[in-house]
Image (cartoon, helix red, strand yellow):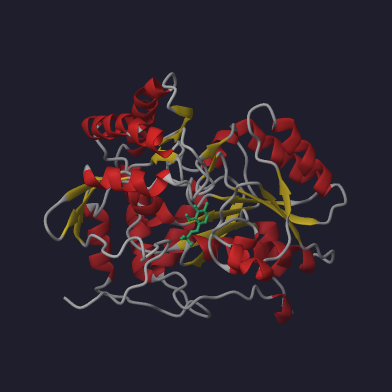
Amino acid sequence: MSRSAVWHPFTQHALEPVLPTIARTDGAYLETRDGRRILDAISSWWVITHGHRHPKIMDAILNATETLDQVIFAGLTHEPAEQLASALVAMAPAGLDWVFFSDSGSTSVEVALKMALGFHRNSGAPRSRIVVMEHSYHGDTIGTMSVGARGVFNAAYEPLLFEVDAIPFPAAGRIQETLDAFERVTRDRQAAALIVEPLVLGAGGMLMYPAWVLAELKRLAERSETLFIADEVMTGWGRTGTLFACEQADISPDILCTSKGLTGGSLPLAATLATDAIFHAHYSTDRTRTFFHSSSYTANPIACAAALANIGIWKEEPVAERVAALSRMQSEKIVRFSDNPRFENVRTTGTIAALDLRAGNAGYLAEVGPRLRAFFLHRGLLVRPLGNVIYVLPPFCVTPHELDRLYASIDETAGLASGSR
Ligand code: PMP
């Protein structure tokens, strides 16, 4: 066989010369070309919610192709996008009345940042500083890297990244520091927006903080008229136990970014939801106030049809009950690691569970990371630790028995840590 021409994301080809070929997906499983079944314990980078190839989503995609493919979305509209926008407004936190479509989590964040700057500029008092939370991740484009944590992921691009104000992660015992820092950086009323991952910081290491902190940040943001951007790209669609994580803090952000689970994880699509005030700051007969953002595949009709089918599943099937049951199972199964000295920071939020393996070195490049991944894969489990952080973020169709198998393997990883010291 000739060598592959594919350059894979977040993959060091010198260390991983041959990658398994996935030939089929089904429910909680990926199946390799040679027939191995791998439990997708990370929902294929956090996108799959109900399970791979949910029949209603697959049918909706097939049906959509009977009438539509891509249609330019500037100056024209179509039914799947209209219906989806109405459904999203009805389901999202109150006050998010406008839906701007794009095609990935990163673009939904870029759109959010541009809306925030456009809002202040068009309101006659331009602001340009963005406040971010330490350890955040919002994507891999230049703009989203700028508002994300600096580190090994983006060191090479540092000269191109813009400056932001970072507030500390609200770790237990240090929460007041976070709130004070936010109050300080917004006191001069020059911050355009705060962008946060609500409740769980994903790529930063599945770091979790309580809902009341989110509510407090929102209150402080209002006081200084700083727009509040909730990046729910990872946390949305049930992952944290509620449809959107913001619900748990009982807040409505000014801007909300969603992608990943929007189509149940089946097709790329994203949406940035905004308030009427933000829309109206751009609404004018003066064309210079237009919101100047587009991507070719904005509101792809087939992806919109998949998202509508996903929403149908949320309405017709007991998804909330599944999410609650999975959340319960995750807490029950991970708790036994709390008194295991090989692990620390055992934590869950909704369907997400994480723990840190005590290893010689921590961080994304922790030496134990690749060994853990290989260890799990060998056992038919797709787990991609973030350095020494092992997390379980499965599709909602995962069974108790499958979780047992997974946690039994996590138990065994304690042996790997000792070797790395
Ligand atoms: N925001 C968050 C919170 C994310 O977790 C991610 C992706 N993991 C993104 C944005 C970027 O999404 P995408 O990879 O679809 O561009």
Residue 111 seen by the camera: no
Foreground pick, 228 / 365: 365
Q: How many marks?
A: 0
| Rendered position, 271 above or below 52 | below
| Rendered position, 10 above or below 226 | below
Q: Position of residue 297 (x, y in %)?
A: 44, 74
As drawn, is 131 to the left or to the right of 33?
A: right
Task: Tell me which residue sits at (36%, 23%) in the image.
Answer: 332
As drawn, is 76 to the left or to the right of 149?
A: left
As drawn, is 29 to the left or to the right of 78?
A: left
Task: Tell me which residue sits at (45%, 54%) in the image.
Answer: 87
Q: The C terminus appears in which quarter of the rendering?
A: top left
Task: Tell me which residue sits at (35%, 61%) in the image.
Answer: 15
Q: Position of residue 395 (x, y in %)?
A: 32, 44
Residue 82 seen by the camera: yes
Residue furthest out toward the left? 35
Q: Position of residue 312 (x, y in %)?
A: 33, 50
The image quadrant of residue 248 is: top right
Q: The N terminus appears in which quarter of the rendering?
A: bottom left
Residue furthest out toward the right? 188
Foreground pick, 36 / 275: 36
Task: Tell me which residue sits at (72%, 74%) in the image.
Answer: 284
Q: Position of residue 264 (x, y in %)?
A: 35, 53
Foreground pick, 26 / 406: 406
